[in-house]
Image (cartoon, rainbow, N blue to C red):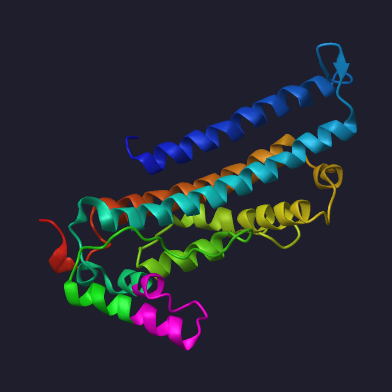
Amino acid sequence: MDDPLLEAFEERLQEIDAYLDLLDAIQRQAQAGPPKIGDATITTQQQRILYSSVYLQLYNLVEATATWCVNAVSEATVEGAQWKPKDLVDRLRREWVRTTARTHVDLNPGNRLNEVVTFCDLLLEAVPITEWSVSRGGGGNWDDVSIESITARLGCNLTIDPAVSRAAKRHIRDDKNSLGLVKYLRNRLAHGEMSFEECGTGVTVADLRDVTNRTANYLREVVSAFVDYIGNYHFLSPDSRPS
């Protein structure tokens, strides 16, 4: 594993695994009596709060993964100052136009004209693509649906292993799949609609490992798709790709 995207993903996932190992140890202690850390007893309430924190960590992994992948695409287009808008695949060029010309931003007529003139200058001068970023959206709302949506927008071929896809999309609680559940609980916690104790009630470490595995396996496939998309220059039109 020598790709920065994969390395970053696995490192962040390892943090969650380490936390789950701690929860495993606490749960094993609880089977023989109240668990302790040193002389301090961990209450049932505290245990539930610890459990609920996994959903926050998982959402952090989901959003971080989406952000890393999307940013890596725009960074690839400016690397070496060698690619021009005409070199990009149609869908990615559309995103570049959208961001650079700010077509998605409400502007008054004067500012709109200024943006168009600046954009036309870039095209007429045929300068290489400079620093830009894809408009991601999705803040607080990243799940498999939003990830697949932005992947399609960029023209990245996201092919998930059927077994991994079925596991990730199967409803596991409250009619939600793994990424949907993580997003839902994270947002309820973030907006104060649910307490941490309530979120962790009725949950076991096995439950948390299950949702972690389903989520992580899906995200790993997403990362691999972007690694292929960038590494094999699929963000460029076929006639612009290095031989």
Relative vertical location of residue 138 with respect to residue 123 in this rendering, above or below: above
Q: Is residue 103 magenta?
A: yes
Tell me which residue sits at (72%, 40%) in the image.
Answer: 53
* Quarter of the image where the N terminus is located: top left
Q: Main secondary structure of the magenta part?
A: helix
Tell me which residue sits at (60%, 46%) in the image.
Answer: 60
194 or 23, which lies in front?
194
Relative vertical location of residue 28 with respect to residue 186 in this rendering, above or below: above
Q: Position of residue 49 (x, y in %)?
A: 81, 37
| Extreme residue in the bottom direction | 109
The magenta segment is 97-116
* Quarter holding residue 168: bottom right
Relative vertical location of residue 146 with respect to residue 116 in this rendering, above or below: above
186 or 180, which lies in front?
186
Q: Position of residue 12 (x, y in %)?
A: 52, 37
Tell me which residue sits at (60%, 60%) in the image.
Answer: 139
* Quarter of the image where the C terminus is located: bottom left
63 with respect to 237 (left or right): right
57 with respect to 1 (left or right): right
